[in-house]
Each structure stands twice: as C-alpha cells, then as structure tokens.
Amino acid sequence: MVQPKINSPKIVVGLGTCGIAAGAENIYNVLKRNLDENPEIKIELAITGCNGMCHREPLVEFHDANGNKFLYGDLTEKKVQLVFDNHFVSGKVMDKFLLHEENPETKAGKYLHKQRRIVLRNCGIIDPESIEQYIDNGGYEGLKKAIEKGSDWIIDEVKQSGLRGRGGAGFSTGLKWMFTKNENREKKYLVCNADEGDPGAFMDRSVLEGDPHSVIEGMAICAVATGANFGYIYCRAEYPLAVKRLKHAISQAEERNILGENIFGSGHSLKLKVKEGAGAFVCGEETALMASIEGKRGMPRPRPPFPAQSGLWGNPTNINNVETFANIPWIISNGGSEYASVGTEKSKGSKVFALAGKVARGGLVEVPMGMTIREVVEDIAGGSSTGRPIKAVQMGGPSGGCIPADLFDTRIDYDEVNKTGAIMGSGGMVVMDETTCMVDVSKFFLNFTKNESCGKCTFCRIGTTRMLEILERITAGKAVMEDLDMLEELSHKIKTTSLCGLGQTAPNPVLTTLKYFRHEYEAHIKEHKCPAGVCKDLTTFEINSEKCTGCNACLINCPVKAIEGERGRAGTFSIMQDSCIKCGVCRDVCRFDAVFTR
C-alpha cells in the first residue's frame, strides 16, 4: 500500500508592493510572532510576490501537510489571528475568509479561470528572493538549453514563437535579436527597459518584484543569441522593492556562475547592472533611455541608426522590456511553436494587463491574445466597481486612447486595437464608468505628456501646451466650437512632426475622445454642461426629493457639511450650493439615484 506523501506545512504571505500597501507586512509580523512564541508549532513561514489579485490583498496561502492549498484574502491582523488559531493550528478551515480560486464560479475563480499565465507563471507562487525555488520550478533550464543549441537556433525559436515586443511598438523580437547578432563588433550591450511610467500601469513592477530571475534568464538567453556581454536593467527609482529584489537576484545568479565570466563553462559572459532612472517618462523611449544610461540628459535622437547598429556608446545594443524578456525562458524551454499556438495570427502568445480605475476586480491579469476587451473587463474583472455602466477603457496609457463600451468586442490584438485609434501599449487598462468626463480624462493625460515632454521638438513642447489650454477652456465653459477644429489640427501636426513616441502618440487620448465622445465636448461648449458632473465650473449637484428616502448617507459623507435634512424623512434633504465643493461624494454614496447633476 502506497503511503500518502506528507509535506511540511507552510504559510505564504504575499509581499508585493500592493500587498504591503494593504497591510501584508503587519500580517506577516503577526504570523511570525505566533510561530516564534510557539516553537512546538512546526510551520514554515515564507513570502511571495503578487499573484495578480491586488483587489483581495492582503493574501495568505496555507499549504497543509497533505499537500492541500488554501488561499485567504482581505485579511486583517484580527482575521489572520483567527485563521491561524483555527485552521493553521487546529485544522478547522475558515471558509468565510477563503477565496476558492479553484472554483470557476466564484469571484476569485472567474478572475483566474480565463487567464493564460506565461509571464506570470511564478508570480505569487515562488519566493522571489530564492533562486533555489526558481530553479526548482524549472528556472535556468532554458538558458542551459540555449547555450547547448546556439545563437542561430535561439533566434529561430524566438522568430517561430511570433513574440512581438511587449513595450508597445510590437516589433518582432526575433528580428531585433538577429539585427544585433549580425553586427560584427566585439562589444555589444543588452538593455531591459523597466522604465514603466504610464499612470495606472504596474505590470513590470509586479514581475520584477515577483519573479526577477525570469527577466535575468531571458536577458542571459538574449546575450547568448546576440553575443552581448554587458547589460543594464533600467528601472525606475520609484520601484524600490523591485530594485532591491533585482539586485539580490543578480547577486545570487553571480554566485552560481549564471552571470559573470564563462557562464556554465560555455565561454559566454554576461554582467548585469541595475540602473535606477529618475522618473522621466520620456526615458521609456529607447534612445532617450540610452542617453540616460550614458549619463546624459534623457532626450531622444533621430533613427537610423537604430540601437542594434549604434546604441550605448556607439556599440550594438538590444533593448526589450520586462515582459518581453520574461517570456523568453518559457519559449526556449517549451518551444516557439508551442508559444505560437496561443493567440491570433499576427499577435501570438499572451499579454499582461494592469486593471485599474472603476473596476470591481483590479489587479494584474495575463490573457491569451485574441480575447476581447469585454471578456477582460466584464468576465475577468467583474465589470464596474460602482455598479454604474462602464463608459470606456483607456488602453496604452498617455500614448493610448479611449475605447468606448460599444467597441468592447474588439479583440486584444496589436492590429485590431490600433484600428480603434488606441494602442496596446505596455498593458495599462483603466476602466471608466458613466461618472467619468471624457474631456477631463483627455486633459489629465495631455497634462501628463506636456509635463513629461523633453522639449526638444517644438510641436511637442509648445503644441501640447496649446492643446492643454484649449481643454482647460472647454472644461471651464469658456470655449467655442472652433476650438475643436484647432484641437484636431494641432493633434495631427504634433503626431507628424515629433521625433519620438511621446510626441507622436501624445494626442491619442484627445483624438479618440473626439472621435467617440464628441457629444461630451459639444455639451461643454454649447450647453455649458458637463454630462458626467466632473467639471466643477459646469456642474451643480441637486437632490431629487421624489427619489430621496431620507437615508442620511449623503449628509454623513459630505466632507464640508453642505447637505441639510431630517433623517428618516423622505424628500427633506437638499444641498446648500454656497457650501458645496462639487466633489460628487453625495452622488457616489446614494443608493437610490436621488443625487443628480444639472
């Protein structure tokens, strides 16, 4: 008779930035204190990165002695103490705190069931600070195979996979590697672009925090393929945990001769260094990024020559982003054809998205290319967090555009998304409901790109400023219809005369909102009204006495006490306009749609 395998019980706490922000460090300390004070309880305490379910943090997973796993979410110090006492010690499962992610009918199951996790294969599973756990999960086997097969085979596999750069442009990764390989120069460089600056985007951060070795292995495989011998990981200094875990992972890899001279005795060498960026959005553009690494001001330069021919200090340089490199070990280990079996004809594999905004289940997801926006937003992410209809999603960050709800059947595919006027970008997806003003959204993103422009191109520097001034007039009710024509004219001139991707894509949010939500612009100008009730100069909040139930929620939550009425008496509540700051809290908390805008 075969005896069942007995495992050592283990508690795993999610300690990514999202978990820490939600209080996971306190949860970890509670568990550690309990185990330290009770040495007879033989349970291992470990950490992991974010598993993507940021909306349920803090998360704790328990592995019992029989190999069963139990994921607990939305924990507090009090709750985790209850779980520890009842389940971890006494074996009584606390069902009311469980997420039941294995069941596709639960909220957690719906979030995970449709995903295809290749880049995120280890995130939330392994300890990101343990190279041993990465190796135990098949880590660095791809590098060994790559060294054995050689550079031509590697590049052929990457080409066969159909992997396109996940930084936004979507250029063939295999072709880019081939261009660098074909440069017959003694010194070549690699760069991992981790300068993630889009508002609402946190894909690269989560991968670097949760599985840094996958990026390092991808870069090492690229070094074997291209002949590069030195690499930089250009990471934002605003990502301190990612930087810390990256540096730790590099040290671990050096100790095992995975990095350094004569890797695995192969004759290949690669030294990696983390370069911390100062937060300039324009340094996400590859030529500006290289200038920053060289110690110069981060400003783009004309291309050609392309980095593959003349990059860092005039040497051939290959640049890919975090997600691109993290795909590589899986492709080499499983085969390019296996990767190409996922996705669409022209967009292969999976794509990581950061779900933010007014969405029920925000966090990180990885879905197969070809899935529709509707499936991601409604099925996986659970739709609106406010209960109100979703109006649009912003894809591609400041460089992207707003896609309206009636186009949510658009497939996630580079070419299909581009047809809407938006771009895939690096993977930010901000969900907006009907209380979002699309003119205000355009103003927000244009203000961002205006401030982040390096100033080198006249139209980018001055044109974005003029566009922002027009948008400010519109939201203040001081614009005329001719201003919309000027917005479109400036947009097209900025796109065609700017040197780098920042200026070339900065007008996208304005152009897409003009295309799909022109009626909102016209309402601001013609009717002096903001339909969403966001633009304060054009909005007045009032209470419908017929719908008001007297529940008192608006009065309690008003930050400036601008509401008066008698609790329990329907129709007695009103807003004192002289005191109202037009924050919209009253509308957000009203469950009876009694608060409206005029």
Image: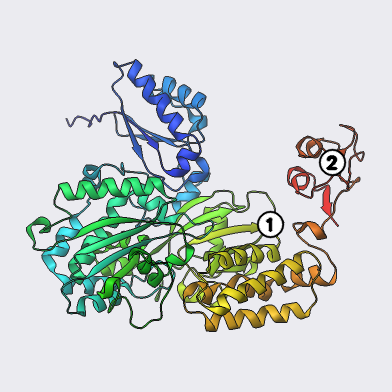
Q: Quadrant of residue 155?
A: bottom left
Is 294 left, or right, of 167 in this rendering?
Answer: left
- Residue 16: image location, x then y, percent: 41, 43
Q: Give the residue number, with chain letter if any, for mark 2.
A: 562
Label 2, secondary structure: give it: loop
User: Does 581 appear above or below 297?
Assistant: above
**Who is closer to the viewer here, 480 or 401?**
480
Q: Nearer the viewer, mark 2 or mark 1?
A: 2
Question: Which residue is located at x 52 percent, y 66 percent?
Answer: 396
Q: Quadrant of residue 195?
A: bottom left
- Residue 41: image location, x then y, percent: 31, 19
Q: What amino acid does circle 1 point to?
A: Pro
- Residue 175: image location, x then y, percent: 29, 77
Q: What amino acid does circle 2 point to?
A: Ala
Label 1, secondary structure: give it: loop
Is 164 left, or right, of 423 in this rendering?
Answer: left
